[in-house]
Structure formats: C-alpha cells, structure tokens
C-alpha cells in the first residue's frame, strides 16, 4: 500500500515538474511572440500602408503627368496639321484627271477642296465638273489638257483595259510639253493591279515624268457621302527626278537606282557617293528639281492624308501579292454573278 502511494506521488511529482518546465519554456515564447507580434506587426502595417500610399500616389502622379504630355502632344499635332493644311492650300496643285467617269468624279470632288481640278473624258461631263468647282476639257482636246492647263499632277483614272492605250495617247503631248516648257507633270494611276500599272508607266512615259503608283482601296460605294476617313490608301513612290526609288524601302531617304550612267565613284545601287574627305553624299541632295519633285508628291499624298485615309506605303509587287487572294476572287465572283440571269424561282415571294 505504501509502495503504491509512493509510486503515485512519484508520478505526481514528475507530472508537476513537466508542467512547470513546459510552462517555463513556453512562457518566454508567448511573451516574445506577443511582443514581436504587437509592436513589429504594427510597424509592418505602417510600412505596408506607406508603400501602398506611395505607390498609389506615384501612379496617380504618373497618370497626371502622362495626360498632360498627351494634351501637349495633341495640341502640337493639331498645330502642325493646321500649318500643313495652310501650306497645302497656299500653293494648290493643278490636278488633271483623265477618265472623269464615276470614280474620276468621286476623287475629283475631294481634290477641289485643296487643288485646282481639270477633268477630261470621252463623254461630256462639263456640267458635273462645274457643279463641283472643277474645269472640264473633252478628251478629244487632250493636247490642250496637257499643254495649256499647267498641270502639276495627272491622275490616269481609266480602266485597266484602256490604261496602256491612254498612256500611249498621252505620251506625244507630254513630250511636246517637255520641248516647250521643259517640265513634265507627276503621273499617277489608281488601278487595283499595281505591277501592271507600274510596268506600263515605266515602259511608255518619258523618263522626265515622275511616277507615283497608288491604289485607293475604296470607291463611291464603299465610301458613301465622300467620307474617306479610315479608308486604306496604298502607294509606291516609283520614280523621282529620273531615278527609281527602291520599292522595298518605303522611306523618302531610301536607296536610289540611277537610270543614267554613273561615275565609278558612285554606287549605282544606292545612288550614293563618297567625297575625298570620306563623307557620304546623295547624288540628288543639291538638286532643285529633285526637291520640287518630292514636294509635289508629298503635296498630292497630303490630300489623301487630310481626307483621313489610312496611308500605306507598299511596293507594287507586295500589294499585288497581298490582294490577289481576296480582291481578285471578290471581283471575279461579282462579275460572274452579275452576268448571270436571275433564276425564275428567285422572283417568287417566299
């Protein structure tokens, strides 16, 4: 009996000691954890709040700064566009349109906002031209159209079937203008197949004629009410001041390929040469005719820009490659369907 009591007492002592030891070791941990969680935790919250506040204030400040910069740039762009429009209208181009049919009238009407427009065609569109503020000369008097109107630009707006013949008819009058006035207008087209137009113009036109290949990818139906905003306008600066511009580099400071014979010091592929000091020059950098030619092209392109077109500089070859799979099939399908008679069942009211 005494032995059992002793054993119980021993277990009680061991249990008590274990509780005391456990309490001893746990208490500092509780105190430490409480201390660390009460004071540093508050500091962490403060730090996090400060960081968040700084981040938010920095973001807010950054947005405000960006908005101010955006407003400044918008005002600058508006000012530049106003200056550009003023420069465009201060010295308006004289633009002739060969093929004053539906599409020729469509583009001619917008041209009259910025330029003096003269139209010519087989049919008589005198009244339509007068109504839009343009001048009209019959195609039978093509010589007067080219020689007497002092045209800066001639837009050949005829069908692809008539395109080459129209160029052939135009060439003698262009040569006569070169002989009498010593200059030639910029010749541009609006065909949807660009390589053909480019090849024909390079083949037939005098080398003194600058060439700009264009394709307004819209018309009287797709741009109703004359709104060109957002419409795609594809172009290639083809020839300027007797040189061909590299069609794969759509920048104005592109490489040139000289059409004339060059000295050995001139790179015939780039049109660049190096002087005795080793400085690289462009063969046309001091050419007044080159500057005037580029200015004339930019003025003409600016009309399309001012009307809101999406300007796309692209080589004729790339243009035809991209449009072959879509536009050709679309036009072909439309032509086929248009040539078919409507089946009788289509006339019934279903």
Image (cartoon, rainbow, N blue to C red):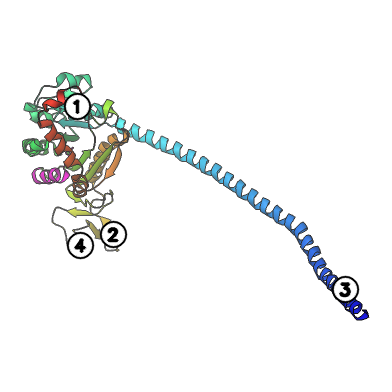
4 vs 261: above or below: below
Direction from residue 10 to residue 85 in the image, left or right:
left
Between label 2 and label 1, give the one nearer the viewer. 1
Whole-angstrom CA distance, mark 3 to mark 1, is: 114 Å
Query: Dot 2: what SS?
Result: strand
Whole-angstrom CA distance, mark 1 to mark 4, is: 49 Å
- Which residue is the site of mark 4? 265
Task: Where is residue 157? Give x, y as percent.
Answer: 15, 34
Query: Label 1 near label 3: C-beta < 8 Å?
Result: no
Q: Residue furthest front?
A: 1
Q: Residue furthest bottom?
A: 3
Q: Hey, which quadrant is residue 342 in on the image?
A: top left
Asked whether 300 or 26 is in front, the reply is 26
Task: Where is residue 96? Give x, y as percent.
Answer: 17, 31
Which region shows up in magenta?
189-204
Whole-angstrom CA distance, mark 3 to mark 2, is: 103 Å
Mark 3 Cα-neighbour bin, 10 Å: few <14, some 14–19, many ≥20: few
Q: Which mark is residue 280?
A: 2
Q: Please state, as top left, top right, bottom left or bottom right, where the C terminus lies in the image.
A: top left
Direction from residue 75 to residue 293 in the image, left or right:
left
Label 3 or label 2, whichever comes before in sequence order? 3
Query: Dot 4: what SS?
Result: loop
Q: Say whether residue 110 is visible.
A: yes
- Which residue is the site of mark 1? 105
Chief SS of the magenta region: helix
Taking the magenta stretch, the answer to whether it contains residue 147 is no
């Amino acid at each position: 009996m005494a032995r059992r009591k002793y054993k119980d007492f021993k277990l009680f002592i061991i249990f008590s000691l274990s509780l005391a030891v456990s309490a001893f070791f746990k208490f500092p941990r509780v105190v430490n954890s409480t201390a660390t969680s009460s004071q540093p935790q508050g500091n962490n919250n403060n730090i996090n709040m400060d960081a968040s506040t700084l981040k938010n204030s920095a973001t807010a400040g950054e947005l405000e700064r960006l908005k101010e910069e955006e407003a400044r740039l918008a005002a600058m762009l508006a000012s530049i566009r106003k200056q550009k429009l003023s420069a465009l209208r201060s010295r308006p181009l004289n633009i002739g349109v060969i093929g004053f049919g539906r599409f020729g009238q469509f583009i001619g009407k917008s041209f009259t906002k910025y330029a003096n427009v003269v139209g010519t065609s087989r049919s008589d569109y005198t009244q339509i031209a007068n109504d839009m503020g343009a001048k009209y000369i019959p195609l039978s008097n093509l010589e007067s159209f080219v020689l007497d109107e002092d045209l800066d630009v001639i837009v050949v707006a005829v069908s692809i079937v008539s395109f080459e013949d129209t160029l052939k008819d135009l060439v003698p009058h262009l040569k006569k203008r070169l002989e009498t006035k010593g200059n030639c207008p910029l010749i541009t087209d609006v065909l949807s197949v660009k390589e053909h137009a480019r090849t024909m113009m390079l083949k037939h036109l005098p080398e003194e004629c600058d060439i700009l290949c264009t394709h307004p990818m819209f018309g009287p139906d797709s741009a109703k009410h004359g709104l060109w905003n957002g419409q795609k306008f594809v172009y290639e600066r083809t020839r300027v001041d007797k040189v061909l511009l590299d069609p794969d580099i759509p920048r104005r400071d592109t490489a040139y390929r000289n059409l004339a014979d060059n000295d050995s010091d001139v790179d015939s592929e780039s049109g660049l040469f190096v002087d005795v000091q080793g400085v690289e020059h462009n063969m046309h950098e001091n050419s007044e005719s080159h500057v005037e030619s580029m200015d004339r092209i930019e003025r003409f392109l600016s009309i399309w820009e001012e009307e809101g077109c999406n300007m796309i500089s692209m080589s004729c070859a790339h243009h035809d490659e991209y449009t072959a799979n879509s536009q050709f099939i679309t036009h072909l399908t439309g032509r086929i369907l248009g040539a078919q008679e409507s089946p009788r069942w289509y006339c019934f009211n279903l």
